[in-house]
Image: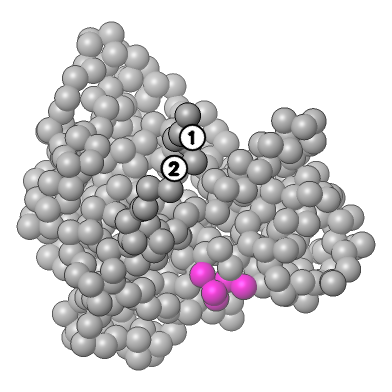
Amino acid sequence: MKNMQASTFPLADSMRRLGTESAFVVLARAKALEAQGRSIIHLEIGEPDFDTPEHIKQAAIESLRANRTHYTPAAGIAELRSAIAKYVQQTRGVSVLPDQVVVAPGAKPIIAAVLMALLNPDDEVIIPDPAYPAYRSIVTYVGARPVSLPLLESRDFRFEIDALEAAITPKTKILVLNSPHNPTGGILTAEDISAIAAIVRKHDLLVISDEIYSRHAYDRAFASYYGLAAMPERTVLIDGCSKAWAMTGWRLGFGVMPLSIAEAATALILNTVSCTATFVQDAAIAALTGPDEPVQEMHDEFLRRRRLLVDGLNAIPGVTCRMPGGAFYVFPNVSAIEPDDLKLADYLLNEAGVATLGGSTFGPHGKGFLRLSYANSEENLHEALRRMRAALATYKRS
């Protein structure tokens, strides 16, 4: 009998251009070690370790009991799109229409739909480097060209404005921004945003501003590109419920964009996932309109953990770590110990039982760094630091 599992039926050429997300790859490896009885501290995955607030879960339960389990419009239910429009007005100071809002099962499908709707082969997209892998993956998948914009450790992982101007060519169509930033925790300043907006106007670019970590800014008030640039006609805002309300598994993301792009993105959502679960959308309304204390409590806890982890990493010989301005990641420089960050991350997982990510998985300018999430308990962070210090003290370069 023919072995169908070993079929060599050819895949599309485009699949060779599609990347992956290393956090989930390392998570699977870490879980496999746990299944063998190993103790693993998870600092690799980017999700809050808090439970979803009770009022949000209650809204979903009530929605299920009301049998709100049927199809919805592809762009989302009217009540949620209106709530998002009001939330954007409150948090960014920009008035938008509900028709500009597109809802999807997570922010990632919104990012993919916008890029797929806008890009032709050979178009260029400027992407901060290092960066969330999905940007580059989708750009290359559709045959467009990602252009790296180096983030500098010396500037707290912000790029040089002159470097942005120099990266622009006649083929440049889109600039991707992510602040607070994954993986570095870097954050744009109001001055950065003003300078970037001037360049965007000059070169007639579209900006995709991924602000999913907007509720996790620590040392100063969050500076929103979408709000401060005040160019909704040439900006796509990416946000969602995963990070602020600890709703990663619920899968609820949204984008706010010009109407023509919203219509195109909605068509792609319709043709791929149809719609987002109704009861999840009802839960999102509760998140956006309900009490904000749970979000602030998470923010304050992350603030304490940030200091603990940064101070602990800087106390390890050979490791230096900048204080991140936002998100819940640190991005320590480990090049003095081992320039091959992937090798070092593998060593820490297997020898110390600490799951981290190599910085180069986020782009070539992440080489020599590790990404660690502090979405874990203080007890586990202390233990991770103890294990790392012991393991790195005996590490030998080959």
Q: Is 302 placed left or right of 53 in the picture?
A: right
Image position, residue 387 (x, y; %): 84, 50
Q: Are marks 1 and 2 in contact (CB under 8 Å)?
A: yes
Look at the picture and state if 213 lies above or below 171.
above
Residue at x 69%, y 37% (from the top left corner)? 32
Secondary structure beneath label 2: loop
Q: List x then y, in percent, for residue 274.
A: 19, 35
Q: Extreme right residue here?
A: 394
Question: Residue at point 17% right, 59% down?
Answer: 117
- Which span is picked out in magenta? 363-367
Spatial CA span between label 1 and label 2: 7 Å
* The C terminus lies in quadrant: bottom right
Q: Residue at x 8, y 55 (%)?
A: 259
Asked if residue 365 is among those painted magenta in the image, a careful observer would answer yes
- The residue carrying pointer 1 sits among few (fewer than 14), some (14 to 19) or many (20 or more) residues within 10 Å by Cα, namely few
Which kind of residue does numbered mark 2 sit on? Ser
Judged left or right of residue 237, residue 95 is left
Which numbered circle lies on residue 3?
1
In the rendering, at what x and y percent does residue 65 appear?
28, 8
Residue 224, visible in the rendered structure = no
Note whether residue 213 is visible.
yes
Residue 211 occupies quadrant: bottom left
Kindly identify which residue carries mark 2: 7
Q: Residue at x 43, y 48 (%)?
A: 8
Identify the amino acid type marked 1.
Answer: Asn
Q: Is residue 64 magenta?
A: no
Residue 126 locus on image (x, y percent): 34, 75
Magenta: main secondary structure: helix
Mark 1: secondary structure: loop
